[in-house]
Image (cartoon, grey):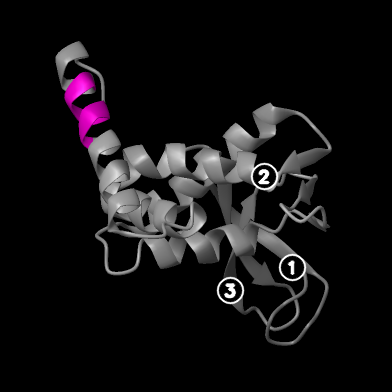
Amino acid sequence: MHCPVCNDPETRVLDTRLSQDGTSIRRRRQCDHCEYRFSTLEEIELLNFTIVKRNGSREVYDRDKLERGLRRALEKRPHTASDFRGLVHAIERDLQRIDSTEVRSQSIGEVVMDNLKSFDKVAYIRFASVYRSFEDVDTFQKELDRLRASKSKSKKTGKK
C-alpha cells in the first residue's frame, strides 16, 4: 500500500478491525518514510460476471452503478452509511448465489427490489416505478396494493 502523502511503497499495519457485519476490514496504517497515518478499508470482491441487458448488449458488473441506483431510490430517506453498505452486501450475496458467468439485468432488478422491499418501502416503490417503467397512476397503485397485501400477509404470519 503506497502512502497517500509521499507515495512511498513501505507502509505498515498498526491496527486491524473487522466490521460488525464481517464483510470488510479496516486497517490503520503508517508510512515508514514520512510517518503519516491513514486508514484503508478492504472489502470482499466476489462478483465477476457479465450482465445481459434487455436489448441483448452485455456489460461487466459494476458495483458503482448499483450504488448510484440505490442512492437515487434512497434519496432523502433515513438510513446510515452502515445500513447502506449492508444493503449492497446483501444484494451482492444474492447475486453471487445465482452462480453464473452471465446474469440477465431483469434478474438483478428483481434481486434489488426484493432487498429494497424489506429495507425501505418508499425506496422500493421509487426503484420499482423506474425499473418497471410505470406508465400511469393505475400501474403505480397496483404495485402499492401488492406491497400492502404482502405487508398484511406478513403480519398475519408473523414474518417481516
Q: Earlier in the sequence, mark 2 or mark 1?
A: 1
**Identity of the amino acid at label 1?**
Thr
**Identity of the amino acid at label 2?**
Ile
Residue 160 as seen in the image, left or right of residue 81: left
Identify the disc placed on residue 135. Answer: none
- Closest to the observer: 107 or 115? 107
- Closest to the observer: 89 or 148? 148
Of all residues shown, which one is farthest toward the top? 157
Residue drawn at the location 74% of the way across and 40% of the way down? 103
Q: Alpha-carbon neighbours of circle 3 within 10 Å: few (<14), some, or many (≥20)? A: some
| SS class, disc 2 | loop
Tag 3 residue: 37
Single out the mark in the foreground, 2 or 1: 2
Main SS type for the magenta part?
A: helix
The spot of residue 18 in percent (x, y) is 52, 43
Single out the mark in the foreground, 2 or 3: 2
Q: Can residue 106 be seen in this view?
A: yes
Q: Dots 3 and 1: beta carbons under 8 Å?
A: no
Tag 1 residue: 11
Give the quarter of the image for residue 93.
top right
Disc 3 and disc 1: Cα gap in Å? 9 Å
**Identity of the amino acid at label 3?**
Arg
Tag 2 residue: 44
The spot of residue 110 in percent (x, y) is 53, 40
> What is the quadrant of the C terminus in the image?
top left
Disc 2 and disc 1: Cα gap in Å? 22 Å
